[in-house]
Amino acid sequence: MNYEDALTETVLADERYVVMTAENRAAIRNLPSALGERFIDTGITEQAMVGAAAGLALRGRIPVVHALAAFLTMRAFEFIRTDVGIPCLPVKLVGGVPGFLSTANGPTHQALEDVSLMRGIPNVHVFCPADEQDLVIGLRKVLESPNPFYIRHNPLPAVIEHDPSFEIGKAEVISDGTDVSILVYGMLFRQAYEARSLLEAEGISVRLINLRTVKPIDERAVLCAARETRLVVTLEDHFLTGGLTSIVSELLLHHRMAANVLPIALPDRWFRPALLDDVLEHEGFTGLQIAEGISRVTREDAARKKSTNRRP
Amino acid sequence: MVKEKIAQLREIALRVREHVIRMSTDGGCFIGSTLSCVDLIVYLYARFLNIDEENLSDPNRDYFFLSKGHAVPALYGTLVELGLLERDRLTNHLKPCDSIYWHPNRSVPGVEFLAGSLGHGLPVAVGVAMDCRLRGQTNKVVVITGDGELNEGSNWEACLVASSYRLDNLVVVVDRNRFQANACTEELMPLEPLGWKFMAFGWQVKCVNGHSFLDLDDAFSKIPFTSGRPSVVIAETVRGRGLPSIESRADRWFCDFSREEAAQLLKELHEG
């Protein structure tokens, strides 16, 4: 079942749902005919759409709102914060083509701070599925949550069969390795999975964690990874600032813990626009490049440890 | 409207202005901007809106949004005079023990939605009006916006949407006091021809004297002005209305008066 089918099923079964879009129908092409008046297209008006979604929620509706992630989270930011966040209304915000998924559009369309912005609003939760299957698995619980939610839409095909059980704030632990943990959310799950296979072939035991919701984050999974493995990799198609790297840093500080963390994210710049595979290659985010980076760091760590041990 | 009814509305508005003056000390309030819309809010609650103590959570009630949230003392005063808000709570104005502060919030009985950031009330009201329509209900949704507030682009997005969805259950009242925070609208960011702007967006427009209950009653009795179209009432008003010493002054938007000054203003209000 894809996102559109899952959403249609949920909305048709429950009168409270309305589906809205600021004329971005890529993921919901068949919904207008399926939902009739409960499909509301406001044209290219992200701000008014989010305001109207708050109004609909005031009347007991659960609006599922669609727009490109960059415009939804940035152009309408203050409407999300003020009209949805402050009164904690159950508006569900679905951001299209987030992170690397904006591919060749260019920096105007690159949502690389969306997680940072949305998690910064009190009451607003954030769901970043690994692929479309993961999205569909989590969708029902996310829609039923009383909180506003930002959903990083991800239509990519699944690389594994995901755990069909889903809890908000609970990560999916793919493998229980002991050397390196890879914490990942969203579309880079595939690359993380490939990197894991390559590292395992080198004899490095990898704990791979698909975070699913990054707010609330699975604190236990992150802290255990920090305690039980020698290196924690945070992997995200997001700016280094404000996303997973920041979340993990905050968590460690909060628990007064030290950990050996390797952040893999975009530094303070936008990525080179191109088709997805070329973006990943150019920016150093293929499974192979990620594995090489992790492997190099584990070798350096081992060498450093050896030289430290050798000291009298 | 009969004479007695008008006299009654005038009396309520006078009481509301007294409350406003009392809220303009010990921290102050946006008194100029508040006094321009006292008569509008009193009229709407007393004559037009189906909102009372009993139906505050009834989905069939009418909805009122004060989008120019800084004028909230006029709303607090009206809610008190109509029995929706406890009178004593106004003495908590700006105190941390209560939520009676410079902008409206939902913990005050009768306040539908928070406001303060300009250009939000109309988009939110569009959503409420859409839902009333979806459910086949006939309740009315009224928004008061400032005129300066219309600088915000989100209002015009919402105007497009309201018109496209034929929301004739939606009414915007523009408090046209011709001032924005520090300057005359027509000097800083001219809005005229304002009526034509709304008409060009598919709305039906009426201009009224926003301090004349008779004028207001005449306009509101005809809503929706045209079936299938949202309505806008451009209410010509005076900043600081009721206090000649501060009326129509750019420097009387926010004031924090001493208690002596406030006592003087109360006197001025009753002499005026």
Image (cartoon, rainbow, N blue to C red):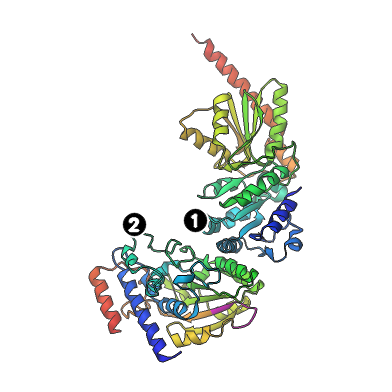
Q: Is residue B171 magenta?
A: no
Q: Residue furthest left?
A: B260
Query: Going by the image, does A224 lie left or right of B24?
Result: right
Q: Chain of mark 1?
A: A
- Work out whether disc 2 and disc 1 sit on a shared chain: no
Q: Against B35, is A120 above or below?
A: above
> Can you give x and y, in whole percent of width and height, for residue B43 in the image?
44, 80
Q: Position of residue A153 (x, y in %)?
A: 67, 48
Q: Nearer the viewer, residue B154 or B77?
A: B77
Q: Main secondary structure of the magenta part?
A: loop
Under circle 2, the secondary element is: loop
Residue furthest out toward the top = A312
Crowdedness of circle 1 by 10 Å Cα count: few (<14), some, many (20+)? some
In the rendered structure, the answer to whether residue B211 lies left or right of residue B133 reads: left
Residue A37 seen in this snapshot: yes
Which portion, as a residue range, is magenta?
A: B225-232
User: Which chain does tag 2 point to?
Assistant: B
Query: In this figure, which residue is indicated by the disc labeled 2?
Result: B97
The residue labelled by disc 1 is A86
Rendered image: mark on residue A161: none
Specify few, some or many for label 2: CA neighbours under 10 Å numbering under 14, 14-19, or 20 or more.
Answer: few
Query: Any magenta on residue B230?
Result: yes
